[in-house]
Image (spheres, rainbow, N blue to C red):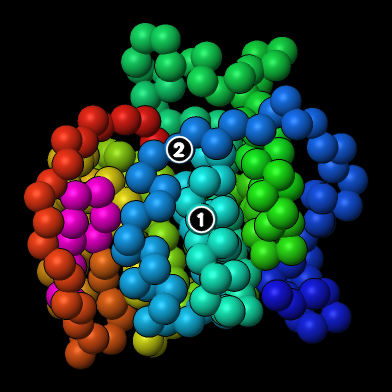
């Protein structure tokens, strides 16, 4: 992992380190997530060997933490830029009872505090760099700053238009030999439609399973994936 003197992503973007002032509260630790340990993470990480991973849509940080731990296991010296507003998805307003999942304090969501607690509890403060920002603004800024990543994980909106916009916005940030992972493929119709349309737009092969899809930047890169019986999958939140 790169520190500020070595030019890590935090220093490059001029971001504060929240863990410098963070007062850990073990009661905030909550390892709840969705589809956060999918085998496609290992496929992408071992193939691309990223110096930087960008994750859009972080929630409580479980997939960021999983990727960080798998990078540890594979001896990869890279960072994860975890981008989210931590304000929840459309379902947290439109679905009855979901608002409580945001743990509001004085009417404002506090999921970011849970994310920090989980990262601290996992000991991944040195590898995971949070960026509290919406995806569109983050993609614009990162493009201007010429930031690229070898692995990008898109796990944000479930709506077709928003998901397609995320794919279009973050694709230019993917390195020439990089791999994009799309979450919720096959489980959310809008996401599935957007991923298929985008793969056709950029003329790239699409490798899929229940819950994730791989989209390589290099059109010549392919994967041999085992076919197994699909588990029962309950469509969940973000």
* Image-based side of 173 in relation to 13, left or right: left
* Image-based side of 126 in relation to 74, left or right: right
Q: Which mark is residue 183?
A: none
* x 56%, y 61%: residue: 69
In the picture as drawn, the residue positioned furthest to the top comes out as 96
Cα separation, mark 2 vs mark 1, equals 11 Å
Residue beneath disc 2: 33
- In the figure, residue 237 lies in which quadrant? top left
In the picture as drawn, the residue positioned furthest to the bottom comes out as 220
Residue beneath disc 1: 66
* Image-based side of 86 in relation to 213, left or right: right
Query: Which badge, 2 or 1, comes first in the chain's sequence?
Result: 2
- Circle 1 residues within 10 Å: few <14, some 14–19, many ≥20: some
* x 52%, y 14%: residue: 100
Foreground of the two, 39 or 87: 39
Question: Residue 170 at x, y = what percent?
Answer: 41, 65
Q: Is residue 223 above or below residue 95?
A: below
Q: Secondary structure at mark 1?
A: helix
Q: Secondary structure at mark 2?
A: loop
Does residue 178 show up? Answer: no
Stretch of the chain drawn in magenta = 204-213
| Most common secondary structure along the magenta stretch | strand
Question: Residue 14 at x, y = what percent?
Answer: 78, 66
* x 26%, y 70%: residue: 215
- Circle 2 residues within 10 Å: few <14, some 14–19, many ≥20: some
* Image-based side of 126 in relation to 157, left or right: right
Q: Is residue 21 above or below residue 14?
A: above
């Amino acid at each position: 992992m790169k520190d500020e003197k070595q030019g890590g992503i935090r220093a490059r973007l001029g971001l504060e380190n929240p863990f410098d002032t963070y007062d850990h509260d073990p009661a905030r630790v909550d390892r709840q997530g969705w589809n956060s340990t999918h085998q496609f993470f290992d496929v992408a990480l071992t193939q691309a060997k990223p110096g930087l991973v960008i994750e859009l849509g972080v929630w409580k940080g479980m997939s960021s933490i999983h990727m960080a731990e798998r990078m540890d296991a594979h001896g990869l010296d890279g960072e994860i830029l975890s981008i989210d507003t931590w304000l929840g998805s459309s379902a947290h307003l439109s679905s009855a009872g979901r608002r409580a999942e945001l743990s509001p304090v004085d009417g404002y969501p506090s999921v970011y505090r849970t994310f920090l607690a989980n990262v601290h509890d996992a000991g991944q403060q040195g590898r995971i760099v949070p960026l509290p920002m919406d995806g569109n603004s983050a993609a614009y800024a990162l493009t201007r700053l010429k930031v690229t990543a070898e692995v990008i994980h898109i796990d944000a909106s479930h709506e077709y238009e928003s998901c397609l916009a995320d794919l279009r916005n973050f694709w230019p940030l993917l390195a020439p030999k990089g791999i994009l992972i799309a979450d919720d493929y096959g489980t959310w119709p809008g996401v599935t439609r957007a991923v298929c349309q985008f793969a056709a737009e950029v003329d790239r092969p699409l490798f899929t399973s229940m819950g994730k899809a791989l989209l390589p930047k290099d059109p010549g890169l392919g994967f041999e994936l085992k076919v197994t019986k699909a588990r029962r999958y309950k469509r969940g939140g973000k």
